[in-house]
Amino acid sequence: MELLNFAPAVERLALALGARGERLAAAESCTGGLIAAACTARAGSSDWFERGFVTYSNEAKTELLGVPAALIGAHGAVSEEVARAMVAGALVHSHARATLAVAVTGIAGPGGAVPGKPVGTVWLAWGRAGAVQAERLQLPGDRDAVRGATVAAALQRLAEAAESP
C-alpha cells in the first residue's frame, strides 16, 4: 500500500485544516496507524496533525481513549458505538489540542469474522466534540485492500468535515 496514493486527499485535508487553524487526532484499530502515517507523510503536517492513537486491542481502547469496557462488551469492538466513543476519546485525550478526530475499528481479515460482521466490516467515525458522524463500510478484498480503502474513506470524510462550516 503506497502512502503516496493518499497524497491528494491529505493535501485537501491539510489545506482545509490549515485555513481554519484546526488540528486532527486519529484513533485507529484495524488500520494500525496508516491514517496517521498518510497524514504525516506530507511535509508540514506538524501544523495540523496533533496525534494518533493505535488502539488495536480492546484494552488499549479503554486505557488510551477511555472507551468503556462495558460498551465494548455490549456492542463489540467493531460497532458504531465504539467508533463514536473512540472519536470522543481522541478529542478528550488530545487535551483540547485537536478539534477534529477520526476513528476506525473493523475486521480487515483474513480471520476475525463473527456473525453479522464479516471480513471487510469497518466502522468509521469522525467529527468534532458534540458532532460525531459514523458510517459502516463493507469493503471487498484482502487485508491490504480493506485497510487501504478504510484509509481512503477516512481521509475523504475528514476533508469534507474540515471544509464544511
Image: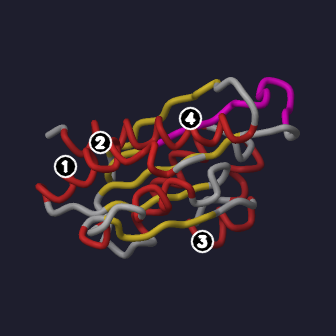
Task: In the rendered view, tell whether residue 137 sits above or below residue 84.
Answer: above
Image coordinates for residue 144, horizontal then vertical, percent: 69, 41
Q: Disc 1 or disc 3, which is closer to the eye?
A: 1
Label 4 vs label 2: CA separation? 15 Å
Residue count near mark 2 (Cα–Cα under 10 Å), binned few <14, some 14–19, many ≥20: many
Say which mark, if any, is on residue 64: 3
Q: Nearer the viewer, mark 4 or mark 2?
A: 4
Tell me how far mark 1 sits from mark 3, CA to CA: 28 Å
Mark 4 crowd level (few <14, some 14–19, many ≥20, 10 Å Cα): some
Q: Residue at x 43, y 45 (%)?
A: 6
The image position of residue 92, as x and y in percent, is 41, 67
Q: Secondary structure at mark 1?
A: helix
Q: Are marks 3 and 4 in contact (CB under 8 Å)?
A: no
Residue depth check, mark 3 versus mark 4: number of the one nearer the observer: 4
Tag 1 and tag 3, C-beta contact below 8 Å = no
Write down the quadrant of residue 63 in the picture.
bottom right
The residue tagged 2 is 159
Residue 16: which disc? 1
Marks 1 and 4 sit apart, C-alpha to C-alpha, by 22 Å
Q: Nearer the viewer, residue 106 or 131?
A: 106
Q: Residue at x 11, y 55 (%)?
A: 19
In this rendering, the answer to whether 8 lies above or below 60 is: above
What amino acid does circle 3 point to?
Answer: Leu
Disc 4 residue type (three-letter) = Ala
Q: Position of residue 137 (x, y in %)?
A: 58, 27
Q: Which residues are magenta?
A: 113-125
Local SS, label 2? helix
Say which residue label 4 marks.
149
Quick one: SS at disc 3? helix
Label 2 close to label 1 by CB (< 8 Å): yes
Q: CA distance from mark 2 to mark 1?
A: 7 Å
User: Could one spot residue 147 in this view of the protein?
Assistant: yes
